[in-house]
Amino acid sequence: MPSERAPVIRARDIEVVYPGHPPVRAVRGVSFDLFKGEVVGLVGESGCGKSTIAKVLTGLVRPAGGAVEYHGQPIRPLGVRRRPLFQTGIQMVFQDPGSSLNPRRPVGPQIRDGLELALRRRRQAGPGDPAQPAGPTANPGDWLERVGLAAGDQTRYPGSFSGGQRQRVATARALAAEPDVLIGDEPISALDASTQAKVAYLMSKLAVSQGAVLLFISHDLSVVRLIADRLLVMWSGRIVESGPTEAVWSNPGHPYTKVLLGAIPAPDGAGRLPAVPAGTAAFDAPPVIHDDP
């Protein structure tokens, strides 16, 4: 990205270790920047550390090493009762909307929770504050219409929606808080194939139109390619390749990226399995960084 633009999120040398016998080193020296108005795909196989990165950015996990800054301020770990108000400018859409939405509350009041967060941040922020919500604030019905549902649906409970509709509600709730960082943590993996691309495109369109950066985490490269400006490829806790989406897609440089792309099914009916290098040592190559065009 252009050097004159200040990143919204700046992560440097992030290390995360989960306790155990032996301890699990889930993230190993990960560094990246996120800029307003872009869609960044964080891709890799299950267990590579993608969701742990999301939890570090939202303060749900304290890193064992390194630093993460949001608008130049350190991200503080989540408190017992609430997050620091400043950090509510970072919102997340989780993998399972059935568990992230409160089943005992209509969806309208849940979206209103996001609207109230934006109002509180606006009152707290001073003139020129980079995390100042853009406004003007809409209402729950407006947000439901923006995600392709009806304004009257705000009186319904989450259980009365389909999985794809619940993920739209979760997206509306997150964006109602007017974040400048939206994280989708495998937000389409629980949806049927016909719905995945629609929800992914909707998230990217609404986030970018609001001036936010979308970090879209997925193992489905075929969907990520449709929406992402830039890719971060993660394997075994490390980012092994990064760059503009088409550059990574058309000219992958790291062995793991080649295998990941080769695993995408081809509509040829042949049923072939991708060739996989023998042993993980084949992936132990230096990270590949594609220059921005």
Image (cartoon, grey):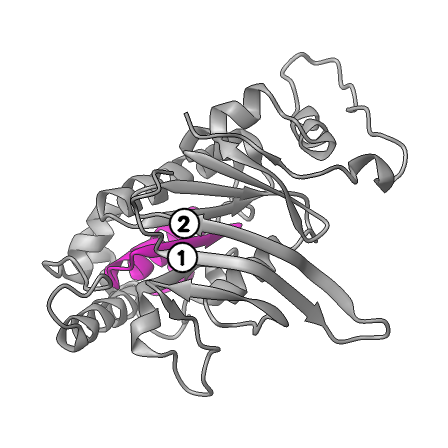
Q: Name the residue under label 1.
A: 9
The stretch in magenta equals: 157-186
In the rendered image, residue 169 lying in the magenta stretch gets the answer: yes
Pick the front one: 176 or 31: 31
From the viewer's perspective, tell me whether residue 169 is left or right of residue 135: right
Where residue 56 appears, as percent x and y from the top left, is 53, 66
In the rendered image, residue 256 lying in the magenta stretch gets the answer: no
The reply to whether residue 4 is in sight is: yes
Q: Is mark 1 on a helix, strand or loop?
A: strand
Q: Mark 2 points at which residue?
A: 34
Q: Residues within 10 Å of mark 2 (few under 14, many from 20)?
A: many
Quadrant of image for the C terminus = top left
Vertical comparison of 174 with 263: above or below:
below
Q: What element carries label 2?
A: strand
Query: Which comes sooner in the sequence, label 1 or label 2?
Result: 1
The reply to whether residue 161 is in sight is: no
Where residue 80 appears, as percent x and y from the top left, is 47, 87
Quadrant of image for the N terminus = top left
Pick the front one: 19 or 217: 19
- State yes or no: discs 1 and 2 in contact (Cβ < 8 Å): yes
Q: Quadrant of residue 288?
A: top right
Vertical comparison of 28 with 244: above or below:
below
Disc 1 residue type (three-letter): Ile
Where residue 203 appears, as percent x and y from the top left, is 35, 45
Vertical comparison of 275 with 256: above or below:
above
From the viewer's perspective, tell me whether residue 29 is left or right of residue 147: right
Pick the front one: 72 or 26: 72
Going 85% across and 71% down the picture, which residue do you hit? 22
